Amino acid sequence: MKLKKPSPAGMILWAVLAAVAAVSAVLALLPKEAETAPASEEAAVAVTVQTVRAATIPDTIVLPGRVEALHRADLSAETGGRVVRLPVAKGMRVNAGDLLLQLDDRIARAQLRRAEAEHADAVREARRFTELQSTGAVSTSDFERVVMRRDLAAAALAAAQTGVDQCTIESPIDGILDERDIEVGEYVVEGVPVLEVVDVARVKIAVDVPEDSIGAVETGMTIPFRRAGAETDPRSGEVVFAAESADAASHTFRVELEADNGDGRLKPGMLVNVPLQRAVREDAIVAPLHSIVPKRGDDVVFLAEDGRAAARVVRIDSIIDSDAVIASGLEAGESLIVAGQRTLQDGQRIEVQTAE
């Protein structure tokens, strides 16, 4: 029997299948590809650590204080009248007894001259009746009437002199004229303050001390303070007053220090910082404030443990300068990370360096 010759399409199909088989055989003979390389090892973060130690530190709180004038005088006229003189400008230094304000005193001086004349006449008459009484020339009742007239005239004279004096306002203290709410020509109302003199050669520092700290304050003790924002200007004041009862609203006790202000840098109304040492704390755990990282409302530090960072929540008792006193969460001897901790995660590999 004669074989049938394959068609051209069949020949092409067989050729393709043969080529695929040949390629598969070649690939089978080639070595297998290496398996995927393992992930690179986790990079270590360079950190600096220092050993936590217990220390003896002062238990100190810093309280805000206010500068107040040691002596302040709000001055008002004792009588109404028109201003005719204001010899001192606001901001000028004055001495006790200096004239600050002069009212129109023409009527008061006229009344004084009349009182002087009446008094002089009454004195002369009383002197003459005294001589006559020694001779029995006047009755006792007439003599007593003349003496009473003399005494009444003296009282009227004193009242008239007071009327003249009330037309002026003099400084009661040495100090600076800090306020002057009146001008020449204006009318002064009796009893309304128009001038203020403050003495700032020495000042008061008023401090509100919490009830749990007032036991550390005693009259006569010296307490340091600094002007807010002027840490290179240390000062001190003596406790001259400590309230016996607390403020009903704030439950704090008002304490006043008296301090020298010869350079005039302390101005009434200024704020100062007053560190009050309550006690000395033994074996306190202290950490640099910058080593503490706030996280979701907690204060967190990182410790170096077996080449990895260990996060630890701490509780801060108080802050002293650039250090935090730790109430719980740290123990003496632990390795505290003090640099490089800002981006750390709990359990992350670290490369440790020791702080000098």
Image (spheres, rainbow, N blue to C red):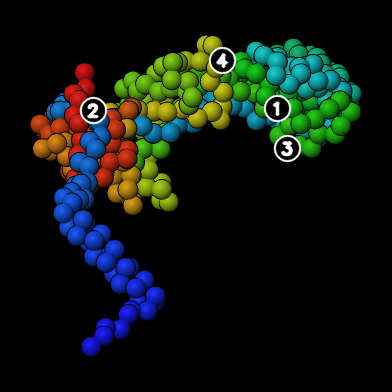
Q: CB atoms at circles 1 and 4 under 8 Å apart?
A: no
The answer to which of marks 1 and 4 sits earlier in the sequence is 1
Q: Is residue 324 left or right of residue 182?
A: left
Q: Residues within 10 Å of mark 2 (few under 14, many from 20)?
A: some
Q: Quadrant of the C terminus?
A: top left
Determine the CA span between mark 2 and mark 1. Answer: 59 Å
Q: Nearer the viewer, residue 266 or 344?
A: 344
Name the amino acid type tagged 2: Thr
Determine the CA span between mark 3 and mark 1. Answer: 13 Å
Q: What residue lies at 25% left-to-right and 34% top-to-bottom?
A: 45
Q: Which mark is residue 48?
A: 2
Q: Nearer the viewer, residue 17 or 71?
A: 17
Q: What residue lies at 18% left-to-right and 51% top-to-bottom?
A: 30
Secondary structure type for disc 3: loop
Q: What residue lies at 70% left-to-right and 19% top-to-bottom?
A: 91
Residue that numbered label 1 is attached to: 179
Residue that numbered label 3 is attached to: 192
Q: CB atoms at circles 2 and 1 under 8 Å apart?
A: no
Q: Residues within 10 Å of mark 1 (few under 14, many from 20)?
A: some
